[in-house]
Amino acid sequence: MTFYDNAFDTPSGLIQRGISDRQNLLRHETEDFLRALTLDYDARQQQYWNRDYSSEDAYLASVQPNRERWLQAVGDFGPPAGEMEPLVEPFAENEHFRAEWVTINLYGKLRGRGVFAVPKQGDHPFPTIICQHGIGSSPEKTFGLDDNSGLYHSYAQRALEAGFAVIAPMNITEAAPRARYTRMCLMLGKTLWGLEIAKIGRLIDYAQTRPEFDTDRLGMWGISLGGAYTMFTMPLEQRIRAGIITAWFNHRLRKMVIDDPRHSCFLSTTEEHIFIPGWLREFSDSDLVSLICPRPVMSQTGKADGIAWWPWVEEEFARTREHYERLGVGDRFEPDLHEGGHEIRVDAGLRFMAQWL
């Protein structure tokens, strides 16, 4: 690529054009190479996965190395040390339930926070659902507060009315601070995801000290970023017996690296916190759910939801279903593909949780 024979005899404008054009070509070549490498996903799977479908025990043993690598990818902060020293404060109460803010020790001066709520009718311990909010959101929204657009449909409150106890963890919620703390975590070889997954585990530890919460019948249900936390946490937290992934499950390769007018692409956003080292080496959405299998999973996807193009999600549904069917438990994976958008489907989700908890 020659723009001139002798740079010293060349006008500065032509030199600047050469610099710009060469950079443009190099950027495009680099993106094309990295995208092709990412999309060459199937070729890597024999190297990273060796599933044994002969029995559930054999299957779980065969995916254990992948589970350990997923923990390494998000970052293992280790078990919290010391006493939880819970601080319990009022949150909300009506004729159906009582809810409290609970703050507990996590690591050092870092505290974990969430809303813990129990029904007023029925006998404890109650089957329990972790209701995880999404980005730009809060535990309050799971109860229908500060939710003018109606994405959450008060699903935590509805779960309580249906006889479930609820844990609603509080996560760091805005993209900019999440990016800031992601940078700090990455320099330690970890991610913010790993830190908040550890917090969810600590909140489960606390629930086990409360007689109202039946943690042997524990589910997790999150929307959007909360759907991500559901899908990312359940492979590592096996006390969670059933999960609902709302408005997150995707054809992950396309979602991350292919711009298309039919769906948003994370590569073209400023959501720096979303990128996990090693994620697309071996952990597509169907592969992550295979680390939850044989536990029951529902995926709620709206055809009108701009985060995904639903025919591609159906392709990923098919890949996921295969793991369950090969183990003879095909009824434990339930796609809920609907005509709506980026929102909770309360009735379908409560029916699923009642079935499996």
Image: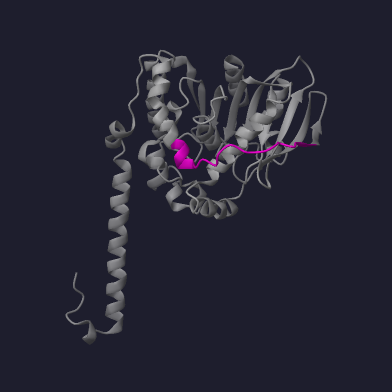
Horizontally, residue 3 falls left or right of residue 37, namely left
In this orientation, which residue lies closer to the viewer: 21 or 41?
41
Which residue corresponds to the image point at 28% horizontal and 62% vertical from the top-left? 26
Residue sitting at the far bottom? 9
Horizontally, residue 1 falls left or right of residue 92, namely left
Horizontally, residue 232 falls left or right of residue 167, namely left
Examine the rendered structure and indicate whether residue 34 appears above or below residue 100. Answer: below
Per the picture, the main secondary structure of the magenta-coloured stretch is: loop
Which residue corresponds to the image point at 58% horizontal and 22% vertical from the top-left? 348
Task: Provide residue 17's location: percent of width, then percent of height.
Answer: 29, 74
In the rendered picture of this protein, how many numbered marks are placed on residues? Answer: 0
For the N terminus, the quadrant is bottom left
Colour convention of the picture: one colour
Is residue 310 among the parts visible in the rendering? no
Residue sitting at the far left? 5
Residue sitting at the far front? 82
Task: Provide residue 286's location: percent of width, then percent of height.
Answer: 41, 30
Which residue corresponds to the image point at 16% horizontal and 80% vertical from the top-left? 5
Which quarter of the picture shows residue 115? top right
In this orientation, which residue lies closer to the viewer: 64 or 334?
64
* Magenta region includes residue 90: no
Horizontally, residue 343 falls left or right of residue 292, namely right
Which residues make up the magenta segment?
70-88
Examine the rendered structure and indicate whether residue 340 appears above or below residue 175. Answer: above
For the C terminus, the quadrant is top right
Which quarter of the picture shows residue 239? top right
Task: Provide residue 256's location: percent of width, then percent of height.
Answer: 41, 44
Task: Provide residue 55's location: percent of width, then percent of height.
Answer: 39, 14
Is residue 334 among the parts visible in the rendering? yes
